[in-house]
Amino acid sequence: MQYTYQAGADSLKLYFLFSDVSRLMQLQRSASNMTYDVTANDTKAILLRDTVKVATITGPGSPDEVIASISIPNQLVAASNTLQVKLWQEFAGQARMQTAFKVQLQPYMLTKQGILLHKSTGKPLLRGYMTTSDSLVLQSTDTASMLIYRFNADILPALPPMSTRKEAVPTAVKPLDSTIVAAADTFMLPQEGLYLLWPRSEFSRGLVVRPWYFPQVTMARELLDPLIYLTTSTERERMFNAPDVKKAVDDFWMEIAGEKQLARELIRTYYGRVEEANKLYTSFKPGWATDRGMIYLIYGPPSDVSRVGNTETWIYRETEMQLYVRFVFTKKQNNFTENHYELIRRREYEESWYSTVAKWRAGITDM
């Protein structure tokens, strides 16, 4: 679940985007409604309860996503209560399933007067990325403008799950430049990078700006970068220095597969996961380079996902091709994003990791 919000005269409007990480079912077919409760932190009393319908996202390529919006009275937000939302899905035989998420309401939310909308659809910008060709509009309930800082966006791929080293995260560095967007202005961000919107405010947020085809990867170097999880440093150096990097990447997959049809299937599966990881897990870097993105690329969609507090647990059930494995991610505070989760790394992942990578290199895609 990803969300954004905008303060109004008497209520806080929240917008939600739900994605099916496991991809076991299409949300647009199964999602029926979203219920929500506002609970007092001290007494646990339910102060507000309601149900809203969910809506589908128009356009192809998003059968696993639905959106919803609600309004919470300002006095309930100012009191720092807890909002819990539940997405309900219905299946054949009248079976129902709900997935719950919590949002901590805070008084500073009521000072966020602006929200970014996609110019083409009028829908809020809910993901942590946009492309260099996207047009956005700053909608504001007052005359406030928005300050934007741009930073370098170095891509440091996630370390293997058994690594004992600590991942590097962005620190307070000097911005390359800044710009101001006025309310009702339509604007673009034509330079790739990492942007910070509304800096020096409690509701500041980061935004990764990538080429027009993102979350897909199409350029030769971009096809090579996610192969860091499957290749040796020698193999990557050889491909990087090849006269034709795209051909070198194709040759790598062809060497693994042994024949064109299987090579195409491997490429379609792997880079399809790259695209999904970019959609779901982009934080201060593209989703494929994050901890959750790395696991998603190699192991595929998890069988089960559970969340308790700031912890997210992925379970891969035992199959003929793979033993049971469990990954635990913890949400980390980050100045740029609320979508930054770090894997709790363990030495015992080593056997599972190398075994799964070996299956990829043996041309096995049924994982």
Image: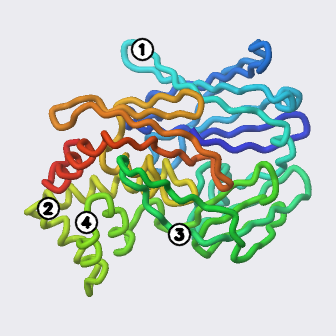
Tag 3 and tag 2, C-beta contact below 8 Å: no
Estimate the spatial distance between the alpha carbons at disc 3 and disc 2, rounded to whole Å. Answer: 30 Å
- For residue 154, which numbered disc appears in the image? 3
Q: Nearer the viewer, mark 2 or mark 1?
A: 2
Camera-side residue of 20 and 295: 295
- For residue 256, which numbered disc appears in the image? 2
Instruction: Give the image's coloring scheme.
Output: rainbow
For the point 78% across and 44% down, the residue is: 6
Estimate the spatial distance between the alpha carbons at disc 2 and disc 1, rounded to whole Å. Answer: 43 Å
Residue, disc 4: 232
Name the secondary structure under disc 4: loop
Direction from residue 223 to residue 158 in the image, left or right: right
Estimate the spatial distance between the alpha carbons at disc 3 and disc 1, rounded to whole Å. Answer: 46 Å
Q: Nearer the viewer, mark 3 or mark 4?
A: 4
Query: Is residue 44 something one can see in this rendering?
Result: yes
Q: Inspect the image, locate mark 1, and give the three-letter code of the amino acid beneath it.
A: Ala
Q: Inspect the image, locate mark 3, and give the three-letter code of the amino acid beneath it.
A: Asp
Q: Which class describes the residues within 10 Å of circle 4: few (<14), some (14-19), or many (20+)?
A: few
The picture places residue 86, in percent across and down from the top left corner, at: 59, 24
Q: Residue furthest left?
A: 258
Residue, disc 1: 95
Q: Which class describes the residues within 10 Å of circle 2: few (<14), some (14-19), or many (20+)?
A: some
